[in-house]
């Protein structure tokens, strides 16, 4: 059934495209965070294992909300690994070190990339596409990523 919420269909499609790119990025970040959780080694193993678990669980919830927001604007959420890898601006973790600092550095870089992407697209979605609901939703995700980045950054401050 066609979505009729006071926003032109073309604008809804534009919002969904941005959301689907974000969904792909979130999935790549989720997998990288799970990888860190599974494979971290070192004296801080236990605390970092739990830390990465908390972060991937938070990402899991965000992923579900993004996919549901895509559906709210009348489009279909991307849902295959091939689609995620094609759409994502993030790259898989190919590091050879399994220490917490290596994982934290890689994950922090990805969170900062997503923060910039989200920040750039809030104005586009709100001002250009007139989809204030999605702009507000993106603002909430921005704040979550800023907090997650802060948590990662706090581990490497000397």
Image (cartoon, helix red, strand yellow):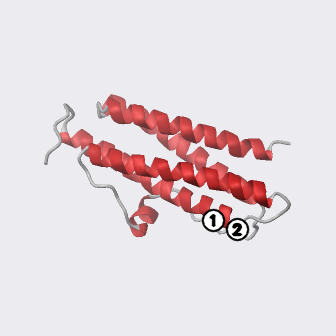
Q: How many marks?
A: 2
Residue in view at x 58 percent, y 54 percent: 56
Residue in view at x 76 percent, y 67 percent: 97
Q: Is residue 22 left or right of residue 42?
A: left
State the image quarter where residue 76 is shown: bottom left
Q: Secondary structure at mark 2?
A: helix
Q: Which mark is residue 39?
A: 2
Q: Is residue 132 above or below residue 91?
A: above
Residue that label 1 marks: 35
Q: Residue 65 appears at what percent x and percent y?
A: 41, 46
State the image quarter where residue 47 is shown: bottom right
Are the residues flagged by discs 1 and 2 in contact, CB closer than 8 Å? yes
Q: Residue 118 appears at what percent x and percent y?
A: 48, 40
Q: CA distance from mark 1 to mark 2?
A: 6 Å
Residue in view at x 68 percent, y 39 percent: 150
Residue 19 or residue 41, whichever sits in front: 41
Q: Residue 3 appears at what percent x and percent y?
A: 18, 42
Badge 2 density bin: few <14, some 14–19, many ≥20, Cα 10 Å: some
């Amino acid at each position: 059934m066609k979505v009729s919420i006071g926003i032109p269909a073309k604008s809804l499609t534009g919002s969904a495209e941005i959301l689907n790119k974000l969904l792909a990025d979130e999935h790549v970040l989720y997998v990288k965070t799970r990888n860190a959780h599974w494979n971290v080694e070192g004296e801080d193993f236990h605390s970092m294992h739990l830390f990465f678990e908390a972060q991937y669980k938070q990402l899991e919830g965000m992923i579900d909300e993004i996919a549901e927001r895509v559906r709210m604007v009348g489009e279909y959420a991307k849902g295959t690994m091939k689609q995620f890898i094609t759409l994502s601006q993030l790259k898989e973790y190919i590091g050879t070190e399994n220490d917490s600092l290596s994982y934290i550095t890689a994950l922090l870089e990805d969170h900062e990339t997503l923060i910039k992407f989200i920040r750039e697209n809030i104005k586009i979605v709100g001002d250009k596409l007139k989809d204030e609901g999605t702009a507000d939703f993106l603002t909430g995700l921005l704040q979550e990523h800023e907090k997650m980045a802060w948590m990662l950054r706090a581990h490497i401050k000397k």
